[in-house]
Image: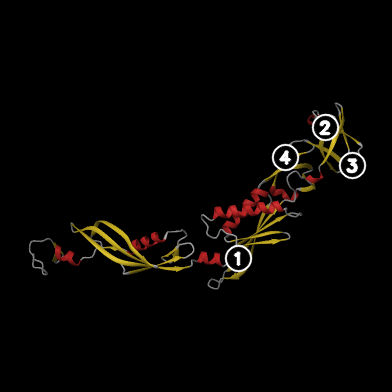
Amino acid sequence: MFCPECGSTDKKMVGDVCIDCFLKDFQMIELPKRIEVQICSHCNSKLEEGKWSEEFIPEEEIIYRALERNIKIADEVSNEIVNLEIDQMKGTIAECYVEIIGEVEGTEIEETKETEVKILKTVCPTCSKVQSGYYEAVIQFRADNREIKTEEYAKADEIVERTLVKQSKRDKLAYCPQIAKLKEGYDYYIGSLKSGRKVAEALKEEFGGMIKESPRLISEDKSTGKGLYRIWISVRIPEFEIDDFVKFEDKIIQVKGIDKNRVVGEDIKTNKKQNIPLKNMEDIELIKKSSDIETTTVISKSPQILQILDPVDYSAVDLEMKEEFKDYNIGEEVKLIRIDNYTYLLN
């Protein structure tokens, strides 16, 4: 057989032509002369196949990925090695070239193509939401039947900030565009519902209390006709605090600790440890504050009676001797609480 293009009769034939004539017009890769890439000017996420990536990608890496995505290698090429290079940047345009070395019909060949990658700066939907102060949840930080203390607000602010910083590693809407400081408590506006729930759980972890969600219809999606909701999340912390006295199931308990699931306390009649699930918060009654604790002095003791001085009228008060009182000495100061006309000594 001979090649109709060059007349050669002693060369390998590829189809109707010899290998040399075939390779003369053969292109190993197809590459557009210009590639356009949209990236967010705030977070550097990129728009790819109609979807925005949620990761921060350096601009140089975005360019290389755009080149890789737009290279089409011919089926006849095997054992290919592709090198990508950014020759220079001119504003938002990267002048690039692609070099490929591969085998075609047993012959190793090399090919180079030039292209440019145009960076189109825009704003992704998430950053657009952030800029507009968008939010999906409102955390209502409240206390039952009392004012929240300044130090509790400060602690809550710290918890909200810390939780959002942690969440921001995987949620770009983990931010707080607004804090409404109301008489009854603080309202924390949170970008995403997912992070809002994490904030609510973190507040409950610190202060105890109850969480309740209330969705509110704010508008309607015109394209689907479905309602658009925001979620109000109430974090209601207990009326009682550490060292306060509560009544639960006819027991008088001094609160020693509060966490997200329970109240830990001590029965002041038996001095035994008590745990109250916070799901029963509605049944826990505050009866005395820690500020009601008084200080007095032991004035007498016997095997059956411990006698103390009433701190109000300075009369003698006889108390039944208990095992935990036996080490008290005359003249020693002790703590007491008066509840229902009865005086309790405190450990």
Query: Pointer 4: what residue?
Result: 274
Which amino acid is tagged 4?
Gln
Which amino acid is tagged 1?
Tyr
Residue at coordinates 52% horizontally, 64% vertically from top-left?
127
Where residue 172 appears, as percent x and y from the top left, is: 52, 59
Query: Pointer 2: what residue?
Result: 332
Q: Secondary structure at mark 2?
A: loop
Which amino acid is tagged 2?
Glu
Q: Earlier in the sequence, mark 2 or mark 1?
A: 1
Rate crowding at label 1 as few (under 14), some (14 to 19) or many (20 or more) other CA atoms within 10 Å: some
330 sits to left or right of 45 = right
Which of 278 and 157 lies nearest the eye of the viewer? 157
Which of 164 and 26 lies nearest the eye of the viewer? 164
Q: Earlier in the sequence, mark 1 or mark 3?
A: 1
Where residue 53 appears, as percent x and y from the top left, is: 45, 61
Q: Secondary structure at mark 4?
A: strand
Q: Earlier in the sequence, mark 4 or mark 3?
A: 4
Rate crowding at label 2 as few (under 14), some (14 to 19) or many (20 or more) other CA atoms within 10 Å: few
Q: Is residue 317 above or below residue 115?
A: above
Query: Pointer 3: what residue?
Result: 312
- Where residue 190 sits, quadrant-wise, is bottom right
Q: Are marks 1 and 3 in contact (CB under 8 Å)?
A: no
Q: Quadrant of the N terminus?
A: bottom left
